[in-house]
Image (spheres, rainbow, N blue to C red):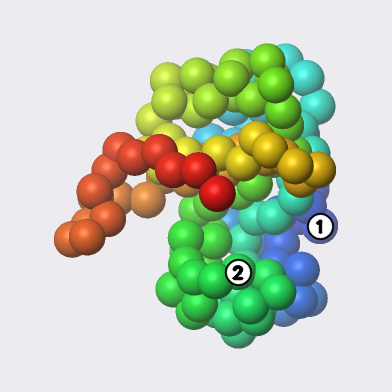
Amino acid sequence: MYFSDAELACKCGCGFLPPADFRSKLERLRERFGKPLSVTSAARCPAYNSDPKVSLTGKTGPHTTGRATDFAVSHADALTLFDLARQQGFTGIGVQQKGAKRFLHPDDLPNAPGQPRPTIWSY
């Protein structure tokens, strides 16, 4: 396994982890990527995600489902990871590729009213 519980668990210490099927999807993504991936954020409980220093999406943001992860990645590696995530069925991909904190956010949330999928956005 490439990702530990500590890397994927909510950072508040509550123990909230992504569901097993999503963790398997992340493992397959890392395997296909062929290089280490640094997790900057994964599962977040609603209380932790409500902190505006953590997220502006409140108690119902994508990370609160356990089905979203942020990886520190940039430049050509970001493009490669983006392509692989799309090929593997990730339905939402957020891209932050400016400034010091560059990352890619893949999730596999379903299509929902006001939140069409697949989709891409930038931060």
Q: Is residue 65 left or right of residue 32?
A: left
Residue found at the far front of this picture: 99
Q: Is the residue 1 above or below the residue 34 in the image?
A: below
Residue found at the far left of this picture: 113
Q: Residue 59's spot in the image, x, y percent? A: 49, 79
Q: Is the residue 44 above or below the residue 28 in the image?
A: below
Name which quarter of the figure residue 103 lies in: top right
Residue type, label 1:
Ala
Q: Residue 53's spot in the image, x, y percent? A: 70, 74
Q: Which secondary structure, mark 1?
A: helix
Between circles 2 and 1, the one closer to the viewer is 2
Return the residue at label 1. 6
Q: Is residue 45 visible?
A: no
Residue at 18% across / 61% down in the picture?
113
Q: Residue 12's spot in the image, x, y percent? A: 76, 76
Q: Is residue 57 left or right of residue 111?
A: right
Label 1 crowding class (10 Å Cα cut-off): few <14, some 14-19, many 20+?
Answer: few
Return the residue at label 2. 55
